[in-house]
Image (cartoon, rainbow, N blue to C red):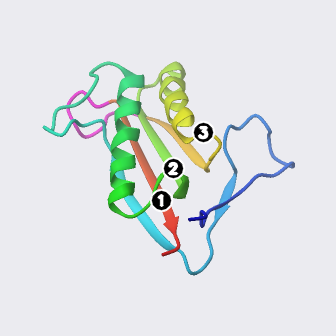
Amino acid sequence: MPSAVTLISSSTLSASAQYAYAATVPGAARLIFLAGSCPLNKDGTTAGPGDYAAQAAKAIENLCLALEAAGAGIGDVISTRILVASTERADLVTAWDVVRAAFGEHDVPSTLMGVTVLGYEDQLVEIEAIAAVID
């Protein structure tokens, strides 16, 4: 099934961004608003305490499971927000690199933010997303 998402880049904006600056979906698309995907194991424990890359990978894994439950896949994501509990740019980049690799060529508009704290004990990464599909 072809994606409902059209990614938009602009030659008038910085080429150093590793994502599209905008995305659109047709009016007939069904939007899927995903809660922040956390790096939680099925038993409720936090995966990879202290490890930004491991937590980003687990959050992506959980995001993909939520997308599947909603009838979508990672290629249907229209935007993301990546929250990283750190004031160190290197920690943000570590999480970003994992997320970016998971999305591959589907370089959706994204916001990467350093935050003070996240909701679960030992949690360092959370990923919010919006997806769109045409049923």
Which residue is pictured at 39% across the width and 48% down the height? 64
Q: Estimate the spatial distance between the alpha carbons at disc 1 and disc 3, rounded to whole Å.
A: 17 Å
Element on which disc 2 rests? strand
Q: Amino acid at mark 1?
A: Ile
Which mark sits nearer the N-terminus, 1 or 3? 3
What secondary structure is found at the residue carrying circle 3? Answer: loop
Q: Is residue 11 above or below residue 49?
A: below
On screen, 19 above or below 22?
A: above
Amino acid of disc 3: Gly
* Predominant SS along the magenta part: loop
Q: Which residue is mark 3?
A: 104
Q: Residue at x 50, y 36 (%)?
A: 99
Toward the right, the furthest residue is 12
Give the magenta-colored segment's residue range: 115-123
Question: What amino acid is labelled 2 in the image?
Answer: Thr
Percent position of residue 51, x then y: 35, 19
Foreground: disc 1 or disc 3: 3
Residue 31 in view, yes or no: yes
Pointer 1 local density, CA inside 10 Å: few below 14, some 14–19, many at least 20: some
The correct choice, above or below, for 117 with respect to 133 in the image is above
The crowding category of the residue bearing disc 3, from other C-alpha atoms within 10 Å (few below 14, some 14 to 19, many at least 20), is few
The residue tagged 1 is: 130
Marks 2 and 3: which is nearer the front? Answer: 3
Residue hosting label 2: 80
Give whichever of discs 2 and 3 has the lower sequence position: 2
Residue at image coords 50%, 23%: 94
Left or right: residue 47 versus residue 23 is left
Question: In the image, residue 132 lies at what x, y percent?
Answer: 51, 66
